[in-house]
Image (cartoon, grey):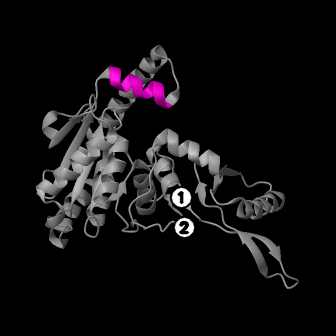
Amino acid sequence: MALLTISGDPASRWEEVAHGAAHLLRFELVTETRIAQWIADEFGETALPDRAWKSAVTSILARMSTEHHLVVALAGAEALFNPMPMLLRAGIVGPEARRVGNVMLDHRLERPAAREMIERLDVDAKRLRRARYGRATASTASFDLVLNAESMDASQMAEILRAAVNARGLVEQGTLSAAAEAQLQFQTRLQLARHGIVPAGRANLKRVVFGHPSEQMFANLLDFYRIQWEYEPRSFPLQWDKDGHVIEAFTPDFYLPELDLYVELTTMKQTLVTRKNRKIKLLRAIYPHVNIQVFYQRDFQDLVFKHGLKAAAP
């Protein structure tokens, strides 16, 4: 297993660094959104006690690591595993002035409002760390590598992490062995048993094959903002023949369950856009309760320009 954990100061761009590193290394990216879904698959919809969160996540990731190399982008991710030869723990820090500037840019705020937002984000981050790991801050000794965002952008830091992973020979370590996974599972299950929790073994890493690079870019954006998404989860019948068989249907690209919203990306030429618009009008007429948002080519280009999105390597 090659395991790279990345966390950092709020608004230091550590989430972007994680996306970039996963892209460069071609590792699977683990985000808060993905972890939330896996926890639901593994333990049901009942909320886990804060003290059980770390053990639950470690149990899931240990199983995933027997088959996949992972970039784990979670607040406090450096505290999930004890030091191992195949593990690299990276932290991203940034001076307040740089982080305030990032918030000003991202949220179009004036400096005083951005500074207030940073203060709130810092308080929230400490509260989350204390709840999950028992301490509000991370010690320098918890990281193998700390990068300062003051003079580097996200892409530069991602390149450094790729070089560090390669220099450490993490990939050559292979995936987590069955024996190592069993030892981790014993430790985590012992902790979970104290809360009356037993992993079900249902969570799994589903590889999504996108139909177009723009869909991968949009998924990257949703992951960055920790918005849960499902890819093409449902088709809506639009026309039926005389025997009641479906002869035309429409499948939106994404569903955002937290917002109860379907999203359709339309970046194709105009002749095809017209055909798709007809289907969307039919969907809205037949299913008025369904919320759907369409992003046209110019909308999507604006997103790409604003967020510097890029597709994952094939």
Q: Which type of secondary structure does the marked residue at label 1 adopt?
A: helix
Task: Specify the quadrant that holds the N terminus.
Answer: bottom left
Residue 27 occupies quadrant: bottom left
72 and 311: which one is in front? 311
Residue at 36%, 26% (x, y): give it. Answer: 99
Q: Identify the amino acid type marked 2.
A: Gly
Q: Is residue 208 above or below residue 47?
A: below
Q: Position of residue 126 (x, y in %)?
A: 32, 30
Residue annotated with mark 1? 215
**Residues under labels 1 and 2: Cα distance?**
7 Å
- Left or right of 262: which side holds 160? left
- Left or right of 187: which side holds 61? right
Residue at 64%, 67% (x, y): give it. Answer: 234
Q: Identify the amino acid type marked 1.
A: Glu
Q: Position of residue 312 (x, y in %)?
A: 41, 58
101 and 231: which one is in front? 101
| Dot 1 alpha-carbon crowd within 10 angstroms: few under 14, some 14 to 19, many 20 or more | many
Magenta span: 97-106
Q: Position of residue 38 (x, y in %)?
A: 41, 59
Residue 176 occupies quadrant: bottom left
Residue at 40%, 68% (x, y): give it. Answer: 202
Q: Which type of secondary structure does the marked residue at label 2 adopt?
A: loop
- Left or right of 284: which side holds 213? left
Residue 211 circle label: 2
Q: Is residue 279 visible?
A: yes
Residue 163 painted magenta: no
Q: Is residue 186 above or below residue 101?
A: below
